[in-house]
Image (tube, rainbow, N blue to C red):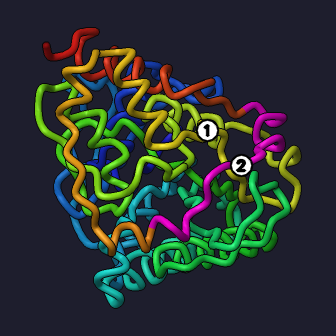
């Protein structure tokens, strides 16, 4: 099996790659080849036992997507995107990468011709929903985004469903919750503080909280995100039918509940490292985001996530901190 990962240098891409290399197979088929792409040079884990092709470019440039699919990968993980805050700040860049790049990728698969219809897993986002919204949001609620990022992802979902209907590829779109706790340095996502108020205090550093404690949001860990991707890559298309885009399960938690989970994991000293600094721009963006979901369809199809935010914090401590936290 030949697997292509776009966005392989990103946090989720790296974790997905590590898992694929560790498992050596996907859906019962042995992985024989990997193609890794990102706008910055990706890296393969040391000792990867199969041939790996590494590529760095802007996949939205003419000809790049065609080059990437020329090797006819059996499974394509499309993780490449400009994150929410950057897509809102740079209108042209957001649409070029998140929409034009996605369309070029889909058309590149189409151009390969008859006999080629790979499984294509597209990472969408709960940002496809916008206020006012019911709580929880059910599987049949309309997507009406209030950000450019959400609009770009919603258009990608429509394209994926139509190209799948046409038999161009076998697509599955997964609307990721906000991934928390993200390891490493903060990115430009407007949601970055959700991870920051856990990650930095656990590491002994200060964290800035730009919104109120009452903000409620939908979360899943990086560990769960990898599980979503793997399951999406292997689930039978017949089980999905024509509805190819699903909201992933997660945990609805307020900022206050996040902080209390941090306190239970690392004590008052960690909580004291959170500094409140209201940011009206972030508050305005977050106010239009969904807060909770009823994801019964994804659950019935076998997707799973953490049961509560304490489990999300534990996953970060185990996977990133070796099981210990700063004093």
**What segment carries the magenta color?**
286-302
The residue sitting at 48% across, 33% down in the picture is 257
Give the camera-side residue of 137 and 100.
137
The residue sitting at 13% across, 13% down in the picture is 327
Looking at the image, which residue sits at the far bottom?
92
Dot 1, crowdedness within 10 Å: few (<14), some or many (≥20)? many
Q: Position of residue 323 (x, y in %)?
A: 28, 9
Give the camera-side residue of 188 and 174.
188
Question: What residue did someone put label 1 on?
Answer: 250
Give the camera-side residue of 178 and 276.
276
Whether 136 is drawn above or below 313: the answer is below
Whether the residues at callouts 1 and 2 have beta carbons within 8 Å, the answer is yes
Q: Position of residue 153 (x, y in %)?
A: 55, 71
Left or right placement of residue 89 versus residue 302 in this view: left
The residue sitting at 82% across, 40% down in the picture is 296
Q: How many marks?
A: 2
The residue sitting at 61% across, 60% down in the picture is 290
Dot 2, crowdedness within 10 Å: few (<14), some or many (≥20)? many
Left or right placement of residue 208 versus residue 282 in this view: left
Please say whether residue 244 is one of the residues in the magenta stretch: no
> What SS does tag 2 mark?
loop
Q: Position of residue 188 (x, y in %)?
A: 26, 63
Q: Which mark is residue 293?
A: 2
Specify whether residue 108 is in view: no
Disc on the earlier residue, 1 or 2: 1
Specify whether residue 298 is in view: yes
Please say whether residue 291 is one of the residues in the magenta stretch: yes
> What SS does tag 1 mark?
loop
Whether 158 is drawn above or below 229: the answer is below
Q: Locate residue 48: give its quadrant.
A: top left
């Amino acid at each position: 099996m030949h697997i292509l990962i776009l966005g392989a240098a990103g946090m989720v891409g790296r974790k997905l790659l590590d898992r694929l290399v560790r498992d050596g197979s996907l859906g019962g088929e042995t992985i024989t080849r990997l193609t890794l792409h990102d706008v910055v040079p990706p890296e393969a884990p040391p000792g990867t036992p199969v041939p790996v092709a590494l590529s760095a470019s802007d996949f939205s440039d003419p000809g790049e997507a065609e080059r990437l699919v020329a090797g006819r990968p059996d499974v394509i993980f499309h993780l490449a995107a400009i994150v929410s805050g950057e897509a809102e700040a740079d209108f042209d860049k957001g649409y070029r990468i998140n929409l034009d790049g996605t369309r070029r990728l889909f058309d590149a698969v189409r151009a390969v011709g008859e006999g080629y219809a790979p499984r294509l897993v597209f990472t969408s986002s709960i940002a496809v929903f916008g206020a006012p919204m019911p709580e929880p949001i059910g599987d049949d609620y309309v997507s009406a985004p209030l950000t450019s990022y959400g609009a770009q992802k919603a258009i990608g979902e429509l394209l994926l469903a139509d190209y799948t209907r046409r038999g161009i590829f076998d697509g599955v779109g997964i609307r990721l919750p906000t991934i928390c706790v993200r390891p490493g340095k903060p990115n430009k996502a407007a949601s970055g503080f959700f991870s920051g108020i856990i990650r930095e205090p656990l590491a002994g550093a200060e964290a800035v909280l730009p919104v109120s404690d009452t903000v409620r949001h939908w979360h899943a860990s990086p560990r769960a995100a990898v599980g979503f991707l793997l399951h999406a890559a292997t689930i039978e298309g017949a089980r999905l039918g024509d509805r190819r885009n699903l909201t992933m399960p997660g945990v609805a938690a307020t900022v206050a509940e996040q902080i209390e989970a941090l306190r239970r994991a690392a004590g008052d000293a960690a909580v004291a490292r959170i500094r409140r600094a209201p940011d009206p721009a972030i508050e305005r963006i977050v106010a239009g985001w969904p807060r909770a979901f009823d994801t019964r369809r994804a659950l019935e199809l076998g997707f799973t996530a953490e049961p509560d935010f304490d489990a999300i914090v534990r996953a970060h401590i185990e996977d990133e901190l070796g099981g210990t936290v700063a004093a």
